[in-house]
Amino acid sequence: MRILFMGTPDFSVPVLQALVDAGHDIVASYSQPPRRAGRGKALTPSPVQARAEALGVTVRTPVSLRDAEAQAEFAGFGADIAVVAAYGLILPRAVLDAPAHGCLNVHASLLPRWRGAAPIQRAILAGDAATGVCIMQMEAGLDTGPVLLRDATPVDGKTAGALTEELSAMGARLMVAVLADLAGYPPVPQPEDGVTYAAKIDKAEARLDFTQNAAAVERQVRGFNPVPGAFFEFQGERIKVLAADIRHPSESWDLPATGSAPDRGDPSFRWGDGGGSAGVVIDDRLTIACADGAIRPTLLQRAGRGVMTAAELLRGFPIPAGTQL
């Protein structure tokens, strides 16, 4: 098929590559414009633009597709279909209707759950047991179109980075299958029940909220790994937490010799209360009390430093028991 590909981040690259490997003719690849990145703030092409150029595919990076000139150029490619994977720009009706078979989207959720910008992170943060990919016929609404094919995978303690890689590969496989037999995958309207929206991630959300229970805090760690990176602050420094274990009330507190364990026989005992208020470091291994339960960071990163274990961090940067984070 003659395909217009539309995508921007790393998630999109395996889909583009799979289409090329399947023998399709990628007549052009659309991506968001290069952005300034790195210490030198040099203009850097998106991962999709870089891969498309390496493949010898024509690249277009319009700021918008709303003007008549951009829409005319898009239609002028004479594509059979457009394949969209995390492109990041709204497609006007004129663009949606230009290819002979319209536009198909690789959406990383089990629609209608998590329509919108950040479905992978929202699934992790919400504690969903499973997520997946839907190949969806695009229409004017936000991820409201009918679904041609879907597949699921357990979330199962995965980080957003790991789940992104898995769902990207899944999306590539599903899209190739659909395009090999388009008539064999009739679009099925999404159910009206179960709609949720995956709002764009705000960097402020990555601050660890120890007033939640430990399971929710640990989901923050996984949901914001690798970006923007969950963090707490100590002595004015932001410290990223890349991995953490949940510590349960039945486990040893591992308090330092100067500390004393709480009385679990007290009917008013709660794990977080035992070591102080939520956010208090309760031992010499950086176990941090939450509203209920506690977390113990296992991989951390200070600004400008490499990733290190909690023991490595504490050797050169002590955070004593009793510290309120």
Image (cartoon, rainbow, N blue to C red):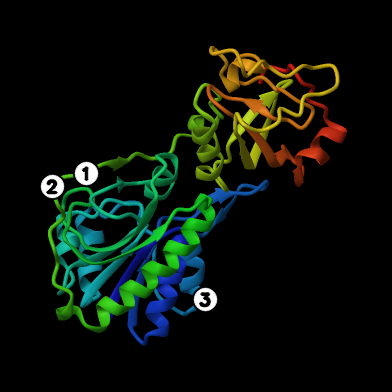
Give the structural element (helix, strand or loop) at label 1.
loop
Residue kind at label 1, given as amino acid type: Val
User: In the picture, which quadrant includes the C terminus?
Assistant: top right
Q: Earlier in the sequence, mark 2 or mark 3?
A: 3
Q: Which residue is mark 1?
A: 195
Residue 61 in the figure: left or right of residue 150: right
Q: Which residue is mark 2?
A: 192
Residue at 50% x, 44% y: name it: 223
The CA span between labels 2 and 3 is 42 Å
Residue 127, above or below 264: below
Between 148 and 75, the residue placed more toward the observer is 148
- Give coordinates of residue 14: x percent, y percent: 45, 70
The CA span between labels 1 and 2 is 7 Å
* Neighbourhood count class around disc 2 (C-alpha, 10 Å): few under 14, some 14–19, many 20 upward: few
- Give coordinates of residue 159: x percent, y percent: 53, 50
Task: Specify whether residue 304 is in view.
Answer: yes
User: In the picture, which quadrant includes the N terminus?
Assistant: bottom left
- Give coordinates of residue 283: x percent, y percent: 75, 25
Q: Which residue is mark 3?
A: 54
Which mark is in front, 1 or 3?
1
Residue 43, above or below 98: above
Residue at 83% x, 27% y: name it: 318
Give the structural element (helix, strand or loop) at label 2.
loop
CB atoms at circles 1 and 2 under 8 Å apart? Answer: yes
Residue 209 in the figure: left or right of residue 121: right
The CA span between labels 1 and 3 is 39 Å
